[in-house]
């Protein structure tokens, strides 16, 4: 049994850290968050370094990297700039989906542009009536000759305001099983009948927009269908494990940043004539942070390793997602307690870590639903 990372992984991690020091100074990251600005220049720089194309095969302009590589990059990005880590996790899932299910024309036209950062595609799945109940879809695509006419609404779609296309899930036929009869479409964000309305946020990942998308008689040619008609949810379901491990990686990075800031603060801040890190209560907070971060890290790395080797990973991915996001919520909360009043000051980053960590508890799947599925995997009756 070997828990060490390969030399290439260590070099990759170090290169990301050097990139962040150069391209994402702390003051810039704070400004992007306060003003809800997506860091587009570092994003394009990541494209030149090949990181936006990590999961894309070299044939289509990508790096052909493994899930372990993606986890390491997402974790490190999120330690400094959560927006970049979050956006990369979204892009990677879309890239994999297109690579697995897209037509050859779609792959040749879109994947190199995604890898370079020249193109942004938003995954439009969630609806106001859905959320955890993903299959509660009311958006319809009705075929008329060589085109589909789409009508409906999507909600909480990340990066929709800056995307050129939406990879959108719509119902195309009524089936007894709700997971059937759903189809994926590539929708031009500037097509007639498309309207994007950003949602004003006060919480997590403010630099990455969340928007509503309204579709009114939007025309989509049949060659813009991705995968098989009626099998859209099946195509998405095949990538859920990847998405859940990515969520765990983001939580690791966020918690790691909170831990480092809290540890440094405990050494620098003085009270009663000595650093607060000398008080046993503070020491226990810091020590416990290190323990739970390491626990979640190796659960997450194991899930990524299973995916890299092609072994079954559904249970491990769910366990990693729950373990890492619950850990990040606790670690960032404890970091706030160490900082006390300064923890909510904009000049410190711990308040951002705290906000960002809350999203992981219910996205991309709520931890309550994840536990339901874990219980099912362990042989208990289905509860939903």
Image (cartoon, grey):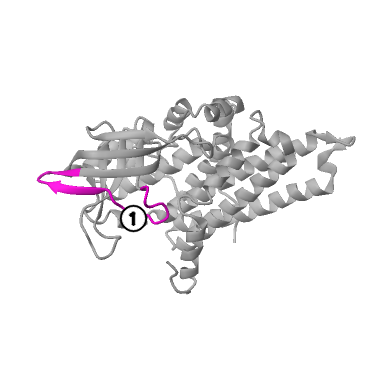
Q: Which residues are magenta?
A: 127-149
Q: Going 68% across and 43% down the picture, which residue do you hit?
A: 259
Q: Going 45% across and 48% down the picture, which residue do you hit?
A: 66
Image quadrant where one finds the N terminus: bottom right
- Residue 9 in the image: state x and y as whole percent: 54, 44
| Residue bearing the label numbered 1 | 136
Q: Is residue 327 magenta?
A: no
Q: Is residue 139 magenta?
A: yes
Left/right placement of residue 160 relative to residue 6 reads left
The answer to whether residue 77 is seen in the rendering is yes
- Residue 251 in the image: state x and y as whole percent: 56, 47
- Residue 224 in the image: state x and y as whole percent: 21, 42
Q: SS of the residue at dot 1?
A: loop
- Furthest residue in direction front, as rendered: 129
- Please state which of residues 56 and 353 is positioned toward the viewer in this rendering: 353
Majority SS type along the magenta span: loop
- Please state which of residues 283 and 135 is positioned toward the viewer in this rendering: 135
Image quadrant where one finds the C terminus: bottom left
Q: Going 31% across and 32% down the picture, which residue do you hit?
A: 164
């Amino acid at each position: 049994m070997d828990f060490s990372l390969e030399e290439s992984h260590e070099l990759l991690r170090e290169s990301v850290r050097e990139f962040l020091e150069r391209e994402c100074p702390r003051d810039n990251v704070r400004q992007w968050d306060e003003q809800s600005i997506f860091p587009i220049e570092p994003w394009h720089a990541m494209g030149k370094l090949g990181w936006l194309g990590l999961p894309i095969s070299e044939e289509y302009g990508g790096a052909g990297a493994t899930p372990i590589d993606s986890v390491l990059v997402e974790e490190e990005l999120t330690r400094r700039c959560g927006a970049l880590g979050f956006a990369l996790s979204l892009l990677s899932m879309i890239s994999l989906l297109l690579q697995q299910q897209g037509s050859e024309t779609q792959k040749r036209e879109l994947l190199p542009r995604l890898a370079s950062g020249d193109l942004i595609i938003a995954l439009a799945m969630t609806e106001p009536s859905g959320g955890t109940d993903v299959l509660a879809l009311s958006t319809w695509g009705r075929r008329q000759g060589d085109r589909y006419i789409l009508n409906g609404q999507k909600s909480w779609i990340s990066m929709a305001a800056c995307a050129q296309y939406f990879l959108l899930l719509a119902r195309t036929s009524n089936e007894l099983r709700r997971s059937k009869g759903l189809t994926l479409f590539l929708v031009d964000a500037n097509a007639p009948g498309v309207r994007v309305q950003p949602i004003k946020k006060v919480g997590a990942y403010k630099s990455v927009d969340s928007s509503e998308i309204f579709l009114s008689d939007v025309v989509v040619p049949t060659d813009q269908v991705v995968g098989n008609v009626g099998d859209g949810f099946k195509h998405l379901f095949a990538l859920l494990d990847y998405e859940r491990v990515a969520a765990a990686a983001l939580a690791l990075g966020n918690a790691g940043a909170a831990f480092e800031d809290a540890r440094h603060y405990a050494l620098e801040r003085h009270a009663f004539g000595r650093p607060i890190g000398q008080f046993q209560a503070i020491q226990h907070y810091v020590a416990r942070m290190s323990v739970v971060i390491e626990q979640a890290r190796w659960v997450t790395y194991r899930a990524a390793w299973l995916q890299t080797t092609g072994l079954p990973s559904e249970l491990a991915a769910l366990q990693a997602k729950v373990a890492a996001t619950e850990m990040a919520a606790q670690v960032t909360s404890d970091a706030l307690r160490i900082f006390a009043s300064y923890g909510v000051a904009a000049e410190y980053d711990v308040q951002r870590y705290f906000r960002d960590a809350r999203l992981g508890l219910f996205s991309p799947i709520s931890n309550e639903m994840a536990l339901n599925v874990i219980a099912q995997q362990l042989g208990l009756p289905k509860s939903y």
